[in-house]
Amino acid sequence: MSAHAIPAPTADNTRPAVDKVVQDIADYVHDYEIKSDLAWETARLCLIDTLGCGLEALNFEQCTKLLGPVVEGTVVPNGTKVPGTPYQLDPIRGAFNIGTAIRWLDYNDCWLAAEWGHPSDNLGGILAVADWLARTNKANGGPVPTIKDVLEAMIKAHEIQGGLALENSFNRVGLDHVVLVKVATTAVVSKLLGLTKEQTIDAVSQAWVDGQSLRTYRHAPNTMSRKSWAAGDACSRAVNLALMVKNGGVQGIPSVLTAKIWGFYDVLFNGNEFKFQRPYGSYVMENVLFKISFPAEFHSQTACEAAMTLHGQLKKLGKSSDDIASIRIRTQEAAVRIIDKKGPLNNYADRDHCIQYMVAVPLIYGRLTATDYNDDIAADPRIDELRAKMECVEDKTYSLEYHNPDKRSIGNALLVTLKDGTELPEVAVEYPVGHKFRRAEGIPLLVEKFKRHVAGRLGQQQTDRIYAASENLEALQKMSVDEYVDMYVTKA
């Protein structure tokens, strides 16, 4: 309970009006028509990139051990198929599987504002429901969802999650951003499932009242792998809540946010109401950040790029990371709060959320890949030796421009001093390759990333087939969801 004064409970049992925040979400999901060509095309890129990230995660046993049915061997008729696997599951378990694989490597898209997050996490629930509906309805003669339905749901889920994140910091009250995944996924899958606007309100209110995850598993000293499956969990809970409203007639909680004493604002948000920068539209999908160059926490992307530049400079000078005396990392306030870490790093999840580690590896090796967080690489003593030479300092301008809606920069600058006293010119990078300002540069690299991830799991021939089906937006939109997903699955 928050520390502000708590009023006495009311005896008035008059049913209140629906909270405006919940009503606005339902109105947007059911009534808004997406007319932005940029949003549709970006959603296409987001779809393939997100699926590729999920396929790449299947190379990591810690991820695959969590996937599959709860009861081994279970196959659900007309159920959700999980890309890259032979699994066919109920949509709730399917949402967990797809959502967990998508998020595992911290390589899918990103949104940075007052709250951080990864809006494409919502694809776990969206694709699970759409694929299940496509197979079930095709078997029963009902309407079959298309990829256009998936892309629309993605754009709207991005907008709900990102719109709520613009001015509202859930991390400052200790809550994890996956609360927004749960809310956004619940809203858009409610429409996919055929719920009315009133039922969508009921489902979204249930998502707000549902127990919310604490951020402690993302921060020192408790960082661990839950941060990689938390979004999958949120997706599965969202699908379950929407289905409970659809199948069980579960009612909503009209003042779930604003109810005195017992509502979300009083219990979890220090009594503050949500603030909004803009009405729902397609702004978030149009401006979403793609992770292209490195599988690394997004606040470090430009630092990693700067480290790669410095690796090349050191090489030209006939020097190496062994010749470094000190490194100053000039960064944004958010990076200092999330990924500035000293002391031992205990696991993969710890390392991919430590800016010093993510700068050290490219300085030493000239690369940063998903396998560079594994124990065998982390055992290199040079990494911790270099980490100990780093200092993170906040740059107030970087922090301000990080929140500027016209810029949304994620700046980092590295200043390296060598043991002989030489100070290398500071390398500063304000916008990562996946930023909207570098989108033209980034799209070919994003496609290359997708093809690499698919080929690693499904082979080159199937990769070519999938990309041919995915390359043209208009043609892709017309495909039924089950036919598209079938190209990604494997046999038992």
Image (cartoon, rainbow, N blue to C red):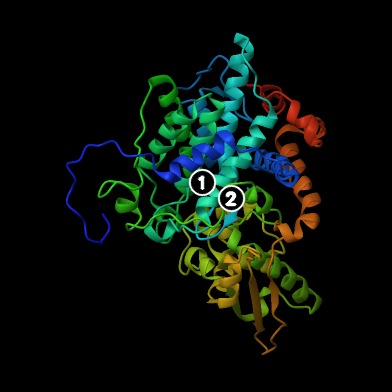
Could you say whether the residue bearing mark 1 is in a helix, strand or loop? Answer: helix
Measuring 72% from the left and 82% from the top, which residue is drawn there?
Answer: 425
Furthest residue to the top? 140
Q: Nearer the viewer, residue 82 or 260?
A: 260
Residue 228 located left or right of residue 203: right
- Disc on the earlier residue, 2 or 1: 2
Furthest residue to the bottom? 421
On the image, the x and y values in percent for residue 428 come to: 69, 74
Marks counted in the figure total 2
Task: In the rendered view, tell whether residue 193 sits above or below residue 364.
Answer: above
For disc 1, the neighbor class at 10 Å (few under 14, some 14 to 19, many from 20) is: many
Residue 15 visible at all:
yes
Q: Marks 2 and 1, Cα distance to the nearest angstrom?
A: 7 Å
Q: Nearer the viewer, residue 261 or 87?
A: 261
Q: Quadrant of residue 210?
A: top left
- Amino acid type of the residue that numbered disc 2 sits on in the rendered structure: Asp
Q: Nearer the viewer, residue 206 or 398?
A: 206
On the image, the x and y values in percent for residue 265 come to: 34, 52
Could you say whether the residue bearing mark 2 is in a helix, strand or loop? Answer: loop
Residue 247 located left or right of residue 2: right
Q: Which residue is mark 2?
A: 106
Q: Quadrant of residue 172?
A: bottom left
On the image, the x and y values in percent for residue 188 come to: 54, 35
Residue 438 located left or right of residue 419: right
Measuring 71% from the left and 76% from the top, which residue is drawn there?
Answer: 427
- C-beta proximity under 8 Å, tags 2 and 1: yes
Q: Which residue is mark 1?
A: 228
> Which quadrant is the C terminus positioned in?
top right
Task: In the rendered view, tell whether residue 419 sits above or below residue 343.
Answer: below
